[in-house]
Image (cartoon, helix red, strand yellow):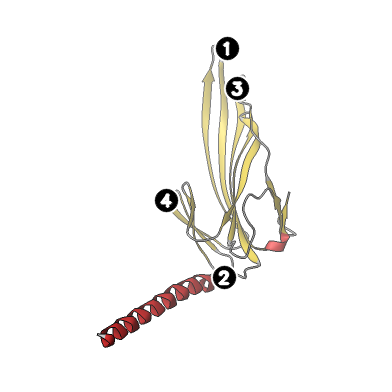
């Protein structure tokens, strides 16, 4: 009977040690698989601008939305803005997302920054799938795979004619939507300025 208890205890100890080894090894591999130094992260920005160009009449647009909440200086690589997430060694990507209006459709911008601590990261139809050691990003967006190296951008432009008739005559505007994704590449976390 003592032999069986000893044997069962030994088996249980071996299983427990093996389980801890597997868990520790998986956590360590996840940290080691991130190939960019923990004092740096990648900054990816996605912005959609809607601009209205008057064609004729008295077009009724003119919405005014908020102001941008962040700004990036391409020369100094300093990112300034409002951050509601922690900037720590686990932060891998800062994702900027926003919309703006200009021309006869309105004015202003609504933007925000998001901290990404693990991949893949998705926000709506936008998903960051992978980051390479040089900062190249692999993005899935609207059923397309987009690969952007540091300082590369993807731009999609569409336009449509919007016609209004409020009883005071026809008004028309050319509505141009510019959908832009920019990979600003690797930035130092010390270059981030919280406002």
> What residue would you read off at disc 3?
59
**Residue 72 visible in the picture:** no
- Label 3, label 2: how many angstroms apart (C-alpha)? 49 Å
Q: Earlier in the sequence, mark 4 or mark 3?
A: 3
Contact flag, marks 4 and 1 (Cβ < 8 Å): no
Q: Residues within 10 Å of mark 2 (few under 14, many from 20)?
A: few
> What residue would you read off at disc 4?
143
- Label 2, label 4: how many angstroms apart (C-alpha)? 25 Å
Mark toward the viewer: 2 or 4? 2
Where disc 3 sits, the SS reads loop
Q: Residue furthest left?
A: 1
The residue depicted at 56 percent of the width and 71 percent of the height is 35
Q: Earlier in the sequence, mark 1 or mark 3?
A: 3
- Label 4, label 1: how many angstroms apart (C-alpha)? 42 Å
Q: Earlier in the sequence, mark 3 or mark 2?
A: 3
- Label 4, label 3: how many angstroms apart (C-alpha)? 34 Å
Q: Residue furthest bottom?
A: 3
Where disc 2 sits, the SS reads loop
Mark number, residue 168:
1
> What residue would you read off at disc 2?
133
Q: Position of residue 175 (x, y in %)?
A: 56, 33
Q: Earlier in the sequence, mark 4 or mark 1?
A: 4
Q: Nearer the viewer, residue 135 or 26?
A: 26
- Label 1, label 3: how many angstroms apart (C-alpha)? 11 Å
Q: Residues within 10 Å of mark 3 (few under 14, many from 20)?
A: many
Residue 39 lies in quadrant: bottom right
| On-image quarter of the N terminus | bottom left
Q: Position of residue 163 (x, y in %)?
A: 52, 23
Mark toward the viewer: 4 or 1? 4
Where disc 1 sits, the SS reads loop
């Amino acid at each position: 009977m003592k032999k069986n208890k000893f044997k069962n205890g030994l088996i249980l100890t071996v299983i427990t040690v093996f389980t801890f080894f597997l868990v520790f090894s998986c956590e360590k591999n996840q940290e080691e698989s991130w190939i960019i130094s923990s004092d740096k992260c990648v900054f990816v920005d996605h912005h959609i601008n809607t601009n209205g160009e008057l064609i004729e009449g008295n077009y009724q647009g003119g919405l005014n939305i908020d102001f941008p909440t962040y700004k990036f200086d391409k020369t100094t690589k300093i990112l300034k803005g409002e951050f509601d997430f922690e900037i720590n060694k686990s932060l891998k990507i800062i994702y900027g997302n926003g919309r703006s209006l200009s021309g006869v459709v309105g004015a202003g911008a609504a933007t925000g920054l998001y901290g990404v601590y693990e991949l893949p990261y998705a926000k709506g139809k936008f998903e960051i799938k992978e980051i390479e050691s040089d900062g190249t990003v692999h993005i899935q967006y609207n059923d397309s795979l987009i690969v952007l190296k540091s300082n590369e951008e993807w731009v999609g432009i569409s336009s449509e004619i919007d016609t209004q008739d409020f009883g005071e005559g026809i008004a028309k505007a050319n509505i141009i939507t510019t959908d832009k994704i920019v990979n600003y590449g690797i930035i130092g976390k010390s270059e981030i300025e919280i406002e």
